Amino acid sequence: MVEKKKSQAEKNNQSATEEEIEKAVKGSKRDSNAADEKNSASAAASSSAVSDAEPAVDYEDKFYRAEAEMQNMQQRFNKERASILKYEGQDLAKSILPALDNLERALSVSAGDPASKKIQDGVELTYKSLSNALTDNGIVKIGRAGDQFDPNLHNAIQKTPIDDPEKQKEGTIAVVLQKGYQLHDRVLRPAMVSVYTK
């Protein structure tokens, strides 16, 4: 009986030892699982920090692009506004040019009597005043006899043969039939000219 008790005590000790070993193994597994969880949590945190940083970089990039687009729009608006201001009198000038032509024609007629001379003086003052107003607003005449023909500025409506090769050069304007006008760098009306040809 004593032997039975001894063997039973040994079995109990052995089972207790086995239970302790199992507990220790389970504990180490739990610790390693906890460590793995901590590692995976820290990895997830670092990856989420990286992924959080990526949208921040993306938003920053979008912000700079939007800011650049706004600056470009502002510059485009300023250029358009300057262009509008630069050429704002264009339509009015085009409307006035025929009246200016008529005043020139009236001045080309010679006045015989004193009353006609006074009228012609009044027409001349009106013509000069109108011409000065156009010049003050950046509108200049284009096309003079002797100038080189430029198809961007002149409209050749006839050819004139060269009589004197020393004075008359091919491709130059022989006669201006109707004056042209230019507003800054924009042609309002090309000059109608006759060009010397061989």
Image (spheres, rainbow, N blue to C red):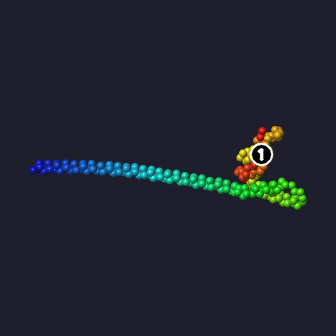
Name of the residue lying farthest toward the left: 1
* Residue at 77%, 51% in the rendered image: 178
Choose between 191 and 27: the one closer to the eye.
191
Quadrant where the C terminus is found in the figure: top right
Q: Is residue 147 visible?
A: no
Vertical side of 123 occupied by 167: above or below: above
- Residue 69 position, x and y percent, is 57, 53
Asked if residue 111 lies left or right of residue 20, the reply is right
* Residue at 60%, 53% in the rendered image: 72
* Residue at 13%, 50% in the rendered image: 5
Q: Is residue 193 visible?
A: yes
**Label 1: which secondary element:** strand
Total residue callouts: 1
Q: Which residue is mark 1?
A: 194
Choose between 1 and 107: the one closer to the eye.
107
Amino acid at dot 1:
Ser
Q: Residues within 10 Å of mark 1 (few under 14, many from 20)?
A: many
Asked if residue 76 lies left or right of residue 159, the reply is left
Choose between 55 and 153: the one closer to the eye.
153
- Residue 80 position, x and y percent, is 64, 54
- Residue 147 position, x and y percent, is 78, 45
